[in-house]
Amino acid sequence: MLQGSSVDNSGPSFTPLVVLELASDAKEETIAWLMGRIKDQQQNGGAELLVEQLGPGVSTQEKYNPNIFLVGASWQRLLSGAEDLGLFKEFSDGSMRAFTCANKLNFKEFKGDGDSFLSMAECQYIIKHELDTLRAKDETHVPGYTQTKLYPGKSIVRRLQSKGILIQMFPLHEKEALKRLSFSWYKKVKLSLQPLDDIKHYYGEGQALYFGFLEYFTFALVPLALIGVPYYLFDLDDYDRYVIYAVFNLVWCTVILELWKRFSASLAYRWGTLSRKKAFEEPRPGFHGVLGFNPVTGREEPLYPNTKRQLRVYLVSLPFVLLCLYLSFCVMMIYFLMEGWALSVHDEEPTFWTGILLFIPSIIYAVVIEIMNLIYRYAFNFFNCFASLFYIAFVMQDMVLLRQSLATLLITSQILNQFMEAFLPYWLQRRRNKKMIHKVRKIRTLEGKELPLTEQVRLEAHMSTYLGTFDDYLELFLLFGYVSLFSCVYPLAAVLVVLNNITEVYSDAFKMCHVFKRPFSDPAADIGVWQLAFETMSVIAVVTNCALIGMSPQVKTYFLDSETQLILWTVAVEHVLLAFKFILTFVIPDVPKHIQIKLARLEFESLEALKKKVKQY
Amino acid sequence: MLQGSSVDNSGPSFTPLVVLELASDAKEETIAWLMGRIKDQQQNGGAELLVEQLGPGVSTQEKYNPNIFLVGASWQRLLSGAEDLGLFKEFSDGSMRAFTCANKLNFKEFKGDGDSFLSMAECQYIIKHELDTLRAKDETHVPGYTQTKLYPGKSIVRRLQSKGILIQMFPLHEKEALKRLSFSWYKKVKLSLQPLDDIKHYYGEGQALYFGFLEYFTFALVPLALIGVPYYLFDLDDYDRYVIYAVFNLVWCTVILELWKRFSASLAYRWGTLSRKKAFEEPRPGFHGVLGFNPVTGREEPLYPNTKRQLRVYLVSLPFVLLCLYLSFCVMMIYFLMEGWALSVHDEEPTFWTGILLFIPSIIYAVVIEIMNLIYRYAFNFFNCFASLFYIAFVMQDMVLLRQSLATLLITSQILNQFMEAFLPYWLQRRRNKKMIHKVRKIRTLEGKELPLTEQVRLEAHMSTYLGTFDDYLELFLLFGYVSLFSCVYPLAAVLVVLNNITEVYSDAFKMCHVFKRPFSDPAADIGVWQLAFETMSVIAVVTNCALIGMSPQVKTYFLDSETQLILWTVAVEHVLLAFKFILTFVIPDVPKHIQIKLARLEFESLEALKKKVKQY
């Protein structure tokens, strides 16, 4: 753990955990009020945290923001925060139990007061939670800004953030721990699994689950890749040998998703997030709404009416989604026009250069897709990426073009992705850092390479903000789609995805450690909506693969006289496979038996405790 | 409640709840040992219940069984039994809580010591549970029967039952309550809903859920029946107008099943079975297996190895199932031979009598199906009932024959069912009762019509045993199948099923009240595996209806030139409908919001109580 002692004399007298950066022109009155509320005792509605202003450091010559504050807390405060959050920790009997201060000594890793019991990521999450749930009492507006209204129960931090008074709030990196983590993660020469527990320790459960999934997915792809290589090497131009491959493919994608659920439940149980109930937490501080009583916990908190949210979905989101889908469709049609034009040029004059020209439309389309994905990130990647492939496969029925498009899309988007998400930001970052280090050296002539705390905070404040695992999962989802939908036409796809995933581990790990501000940890118990997305994709894969099999010349030879018979058989096989898939989902339990028992035991003991407790009425 | 006072002087001094009938040649030694164990205190491993031998009554002249025992319990014992079982009752704050003796005064309906807090059905269930879990201690065999081995943890009652020493164990009817219930249930002239709460009070939750489902299903069928009648009246011979009907049909069956889940959750919450966890109960006493510790509750109980069970499923059950399926298939083929023969006779000589002959094979087949269903009740009803209909619909594609077969099957099996399950047993029962009452009158010249307790017990001991709701659900399942699969060909099916269900309510209510021994109550929280069975049927219905639509002449006219196009469109529509169905299942929550909140609140308070409790370590 980062201890209070610091090389820099201007450093605070406690372990700084979270940085608050206020606007440089924020009014004194506002700052004093906010700091007062943060330091105030909990019984007065404060957060009872420690705050100190960051000193000016060395960069005094330049314009700098004086309103940067470091937030920390005493060990007692952090432990009581952990209790409020309901963090699950390993109990002395080996089960996972919600932490309480009163029986802290019964938890396995609790030694003395605090050391290494809560990870720094957990401490930062606790502080974030305390700051987020710092609510307005009787203030009607933010002191100093009469226009910025408040009402009882409104999260102060969120209101300040939405008005631009609070610029950002981020947790600090730990230089030493980060160095150790990045060494064991991606700098080591020896090939090994990722240190998931260490990643969880430093970045929290959500991040660790993402990297766990990335690793699992890569290993799961290996059998598919191994089968794909000989297909590619020996049957180079024989597009109709893919029946066995397609059958293997769709059994594979069902099984790996089911097994992932079990693996992820094991991880989440070990990390204590599986038992922790999200429903019992206080609502996200971003929720607007009048104050009411939570019907489950009985706590007073803002309630958000459900009907309003649904209205917004149907009146705003839905039309927007439809418009974007239409745009994507137009772009796809333009791509086909270009493709046709390139083909006609090549047919007229078949030279090496017109041969290259054939690939140009696909490459342009891949680039346009990436740009469009960037613009409307959230809903259309599926359509964007797969619409043209479906069109080629089932309307044009041109397997050669499908193969070529798939390869171009895969390779182009992989190169673009890795470049855009890791190396470009790193390069920009590096230039900035060098300037800063250079400046510091000039003034202080430091002996070691370590930057003093003040400079570290100012450097980190300028790093990009990591926006969550959404984009990372989306990338994996699209790769999964390419492999499960069309890899029987282009068996090398699995190999390309495996290679991509291996570099992805390195580039993602690298960007987490060196490009972005440290993100707040996210106590996730599973990969959330992505599980559903991957499963939906695997259902679509069954349909697609069956259709591709039905269209293969190899199968067609069996039904030369009757196309109707062929289709009926294909549909019958598809229904059997779908039924088989659902039975498989049903038969494989989502949570391994030994963890089910532990969860049931917790529930049983809770109910028993409730029975006992009621006696005291 | 039935009180201890009885007209008959030979009656016991406590409220008799459950009857134990031992073999008339059971050894004195065995009886003394069993009664000792039942009366013994719980700390000595006994059941701590009250037992008395039934007197000889009036029928002394005839052979009678002297070894009939009445079992009851003190109120304190029943309340502690309710606590052991974890019965859920309404708490003073309106939520459902597990009952505990220590805070009995906080439960809403608890007044004084006992009266009407536990229903008689609950008391009987508690006594059954206590008797079932009366386990062998250090006995190596049943006293008096050295061949009948025992081992620590083995249920004594089960071993005696399996060896024929204990003939039966059944709960007593309550004449007064039964009279009131049967009046409000089916004797009233006014049409009204069934008194589900009273049924639950008298028969327990499992029975009440069955009757709730029967009623719900009947109401759910009404819209379908209303649409069906004009189809039947006006388009008598126009088999191709069924597209709209089929579409309505498959939306209907998805929606009603989802809504039933919500309705059933509401019922089960009100009755306290939704929160009660089956997993925490002790294992069924029938389980063989060595004694071990339950990993969830920590209680010592017999554990049954899972692998053994699976081995039995694969080596015994599966081959048996396959053999029976093969037999069913043979019978179906014979039916088609008969059908063809009848048709050829009618074609040769078309008279009125040969016209009737056309229906004979269907009727014979319906009767044979019923007989086969009786013989191997558990797995083949689906195949038995629907195989021939599928064959006619999709292989023979003969809609006239399908319509005729469906009508014959429906009507014949309805008549057979109601006759076999209610009126035949009632008639046999009635003859026996009359003889007995006649004999009693001759000796005692009773003033009222009420039989004394001794005779009541002996009469009930001779009533048939109700074997659970399996057959009743199966009947509804088959009717649901007929309606959802084929009613677009024969829209009157829904009307017939509605009529059948109305009479079914009466005949089932009648048989519960007058034909069978009172069954032990079954604390069910839902209709169990039948929910899955009905949902599977509704998926099959989507496929079947789409295929029927695709085959209809009306649709075929749109695709005169290309059969392939027709099939592809049918398959596409079917996939969209299936996807829609799954989205609908996903979108409609299984448990209504307000009950979800109550359940979450219980869980939250339990976890909070556990946190508090651990302090005392």
Image (cartoon, coloured by chain):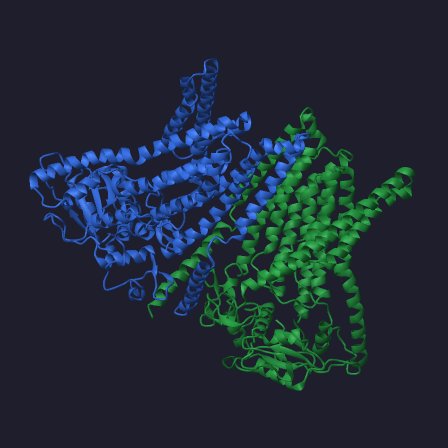
Chain colours: A green, B blue
Foreground residue, B576 or B87? B576
Residue B107, image x, y percentages: 31, 64
From the viewer's perspective, tell me whether residue B343 is left or right of residue B304: right
Quarter of the N terminus of chain B within the rendering: bottom left
Where is residue A407? Give x, y as percent: 77, 45
* Residue ranking furthest to the top: B348
Q: Locate the C terminus of chain B by quadrant.
A: bottom left
Q: Residue at x 66, y 55 (%)?
A: A473
Residue found farthest to the front: B234
Report if residue B12 is visible in the image: yes
Q: Position of residue A59 (x, y in %)?
A: 77, 80
Q: Quadrant of residue B407?
A: top left
Of residues A316 and A209, the one drawn nearer to the viewer in this rendering: A316
Instruction: Work out whether A615 lies above or below B183.
Output: below
Measured from the top left, where is residue A517 in percent x and y?
69, 68
- Could you tell me which residue is drawn at 68 percent across and 30 percent down? B562
Q: Is residue B24 visible?
A: no
Number of numbered callouts drawn: 0
**Residue plotted at (87% across, 45% down):** A357
Q: Which is more toward the observer, B378 or A410?
A: B378
For residue A532, above or below residue A511: above
The quarter holding residue A528 reads bottom right
Location of residue A353 (image quadrant): top right
- Answer left or right for B469 relative to B14: right
Q: In the rendered view, does B267 fall on the left or right side of A227?
A: left
Q: Is residue B497 above or below residue B293?
A: above
Residue at 60%, 33% (x, y): give it.
Answer: B554
The residue sitting at the bottom extreme is: A29
